Image (spheres, rainbow, N blue to C red):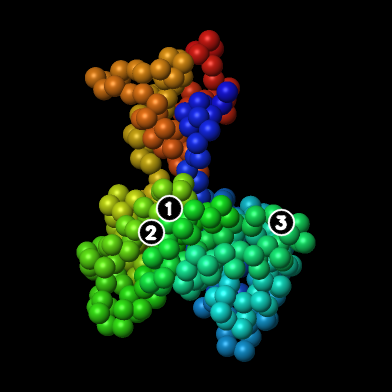
Amino acid sequence: MHPSEILFQGKRQPLLLPACDHYAGSEKLMRKSMALQQDLGPLFDITFDCEDGAATGAEQEHAQLVAALLNDEGNRHARIGARLHDSDSVHFASDLATIVGGAARRLAYIVLPKADSVGDVLRAIELINEHALPAGRAALPLHVLIETHGALRDAFAIAALPQVECLSFGIMDFVSAHYGAIPGSAMRTPGQFTHPLVVRAKLEMVAACHAYGKVASHNVTTEIKDTSVVANDAQRAGAEFGFTRMWSIHPDQIKPIIKAFTPRVSELHEASSILVEAANAQWGPIAQNGRLHDRASYRYYWTVLQRARLAGLALPDAAAALVNHDHSPESS
């Protein structure tokens, strides 16, 4: 059996996605982000934006551009998604027909904004599948923006839907939905990490994600000149709030976000040492450096290895063999 089967024993393993979700709206920025992804590899996702990226009156042309770029050979890693107009928009059906109907096989996911309930998400999934299935794509992953009171209320029900793989916090729309009751300073640091209503919303959404093994994606940092700001936001989002992914709106934000969510080398080596010894002990309890470890902690360290690999870190040979299932106690 593969170690993951032993450790999770049939339970749902937590879904892992690249730590950075980079948004691009204009053709110039879309192509630039694709070139960067080709250079760095699939260490980050790209989301082509129809909701805020399309010029008024040119929504159909924008959707056609998105579909063309998704089908372009530059999408070599198939890690590009698309944020459509919201499901109440007159452009939603056209987005679906053009982007999902025309590029379903090359889409990594669809992002759904402005949902106000689990019912909204279910109806959107039904419509998405009506276009995706004939195009040869079953269960196209859906990322749902949590930016309304109703979506926050139904966060657990939304996260429980099998086709939903990520909930993403939309802080600006969420704060605006309070019509001045939350100050604008809560859209950025430090307010976004201290205002009680914003903190409560983030924690509710993250808890819903982790309850169902889904990915929690943190909101954008609007500061694009000082990369230390985005690095600090990403570090706090992960360490203090449990997010495992974050938006980027500028190419300079991508690397700081990835770095903040990547396990440190010391953590990687600790996880490797513990798991290799555990495998040699047939996954029974072990004592290392005066501390007891068993399958409960093994599951944590297994996730550390997966996150490190997803971020492009080279695993120690013994850990790589374990992940690839080439390791066995007898061969050690």
Residue 266 pos. (x, y %) = 34, 34
Q: Under tag 3, what secondary structure?
A: loop
Kindly identify the residue that appears in the image at 37 percent across and 30 percent down: 296
Q: How many marks?
A: 3
Residues at marks 3 and 1 touching, judged by CB atoms closer than 8 Å:
no
Whole-angstrom CA distance, mark 3 to mark 1, is: 24 Å
Kindly identify the residue that appears in the image at 65 percent across and 55 percent down: 139
Q: Earlier in the sequence, mark 3 or mark 2?
A: 3
Residue extending farthest bottom:
57
Kindly identify the residue that appears in the image at 54 percent across and 16 percent down: 328
74 sits left or right of 88 in the view = right
Question: Relative to the observer, which residue lies in front, 204 or 294?
Answer: 204
Residue where numbered disc 2 is placed = 205
Residue where numbered disc 3 is placed = 137
> Three-letter amino acid code at disc 3?
Arg
> Three-letter amino acid code at disc 2?
Met
Answer above or below: position of 155 versus 27.
above
Residue where numbered disc 1 is placed = 209
Residue extending farthest front:
119
Dot 3: within a 10 Å radius of its alpha carbon, few (fewer than 14), some, or many (20 or more) residues?
A: some
Residue 267 pos. (x, y %) = 35, 35
Answer above or below: position of 53 versus 9.
below
Question: Relative to the observer, which residue lies in front, 182 or 24?
Answer: 182
Residue extending farthest top:
330
Residue 321 pos. (x, y %) = 54, 25
Q: Under tag 2, what secondary structure?
A: helix
Q: Under tag 1, what secondary structure?
A: helix
Residues at marks 2 and 1 touching, judged by CB atoms closer than 8 Å:
yes
Residue 190 visible, this angle: no
